[in-house]
Amino acid sequence: MREFIMRPEILDLEPYKPGLSIEQIKDKYGLDNIIKLGSNENPLGASPRVQKVIERHAAGVFRYPQNHSPRLTAAISKSIGVPEENIVVGNGSDEIIDMLIRMKCRPGLDNIICYSHSFSMYGLTAKLCGVEYREVERNDGYQLPLDRLAEAADENTALVFITSPDNPTGLAATVEDISVLAGVLPENCLLVVDEAYIDFVWPPESYTPVQAFDKFSNLVALRTFSKAYGLAGMRVGYGVMPASIAGYLKRARIPFTVNTLAEEAAIEALADEDFYHKTLEVVMRGREYLTAELEKLGCDVLPSQANFLMFQPPKPAQRLFKELLKRGVIVRPLASFGLGKHIRVNMGTDKENEQFIKILSEVLAGE
Ligand SMILES: *Cc1c(COP(=O)(O)O)cnc(C)c1O
C-alpha cells in the first residue's frame, strides 16, 4: 500500500466514539427492546408537528437552501431577544465550535483553554487546526474551575470554553460567575459558553448570560436543537456572538451546511411550545426520580442541571456498563472523558427510568 504524507496533527487521532446505537446492540445481544439512555437525546422523540413539517417540505429539497438560514435566524432572534446580526446558525453547534476555532485561532501561535474532563470536540478541533489546547484541572468535586481558567489565559489565548450545564457532570455556572470570568479575560479572548443543556436549568435567569447579552462584549453562547428540541439527527444549532465575529464566520464558512429540512424543522420546533414544555416536565421529573433512586442503590450522584446525571456506582463502571448492555440498557461509561469510575445516564420517559432502575438494581444485587 502506498504511504501518503498527511498533516502531522491528524496522524495519532482516535476517531470520535459516540454512544452505541440501538441497532448495534440489538444485533450484538439478540434483543428486541432497547432502552437508550447514553446520548442525552429527547425522551419524547421528535415533536409530531415537526415531523409533519419535514414531510411537507420533502418535495422542495431539489432547491438549494438559503445560505445562513435567514428565516431560522429571525425565529431564533425573536425567541431569545438577541438581534439577528449576533446569530450564526450551523450544522449542529459542533459546526459553530469548528468555525470559531478555525476562524479565530492562528495555528502555531494562539491557544484555547478548557477545563479537564470536558466535551471532546474542543480539543479535537483545536488539534486538527494546529492550535495549542490547554487544560485546567477541576476543583474538588468536579466543580467548574472558572477562576483558574482566567489565570491560565495569556495574550495569545483566543478562546476559553466552558460547558454550562456541563457535560458530563451536569453542574452549571451562574451568570455572576460567567460575568466575572468574561470581565477578566485578556483583550483578544472570547469566552465561549456551550449551552447545549441550558433548557434544563432552573431558574433560567440565574444561569444563562444570553438574557443579558448586550452587557457583554466578548461572549459567545452556543445552543443546539439536538437536546431539548429533539432534533439530534437533523444537525442544527447556533451561536450568539459579537456582530463582528458573526460577520467573519459568515464570510468564511462553507455555504449551505444547514439543509432545507433542518431549517424548517428547527423553525417549527421553536413554535411548538407545547412539546418543548412537555420535554422539560418529563426531564425534570425524571431527574428527581433518578437522583433519589440511584442514591438508594448506593451510587454517588452529582446534582445535575441537565437532562442527564453523572454518578459513581458502587461497582466498577465499565463492568456495570457491559452488564446493562447485555440486558438492553445503553448508558455512557465516562472513560473517554477521563472518568473511568463514572457513568452518565440521561433521563428517559417515566417508564424507561423505572425499567432502568429495576435492571440496575438487579445487576448490582447479582454481582
Ligand atoms: C450534545 C452537545 C452539543 C450539541 O452538539 P450538536 O452538534 O448541536 O448536536 C454541544 N456541546 C455539548 C457539550 C454537548 O453535549
Image: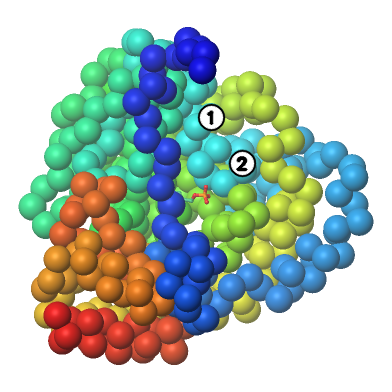
Q: Amino acid at mark 2?
A: Gly
Q: Is mark 2 within 8 Å of ligand 1?
A: yes
**In this view of the protein, which residue sits in the foreground, 1 or 362?**
1
Q: Is residue 282 visible?
A: no
| Cα–Cα gap, marks 1 and 2 | 9 Å
Q: Under tag 2, what secondary structure?
A: strand
How dense is the environment of label 1, judged by Cα within 10 Å: few (below 14), some, or many (20 and up)? many
Q: Which residue is mark 1?
A: 99
Q: Which residue is mark 2?
A: 90
Residue at x 48%, y 36% (from the top left corner): 97
Residue at x 66%, y 73% (from the top left corner): 47
Quadrant of res 313 = bottom left
**In this view of the protein, which residue sits in the foreground, 90 or 130?**
130
Residue 217 at x, y percent in the picture: 43, 32
**In this view of the protein, which residue sits in the foreground, 355 or 278?**
355
Query: In the figure, is residue 84 to the left or right of 49?
Result: left
Residue at x 62%, y 43% (from the top left corner): 91
Q: Under tag 1, what secondary structure?
A: helix
How dense is the environment of label 2, judged by Cα within 10 Å: few (below 14), some, or many (20 and up)? many
Query: Furthest residue to the front?
Result: 1
Residue 130 at x, y percent in the picture: 39, 17
Residue 300 at x, y percent in the picture: 14, 71
Task: Say above or below: 81 vs 229.
Answer: above
Circle number at residue 247: none
Q: Is residue 50 visible?
A: yes
Residue at x 90%, y 45% (from the top left corner): 62
Q: Earlier in the sequence, mark 1 or mark 2?
A: 2
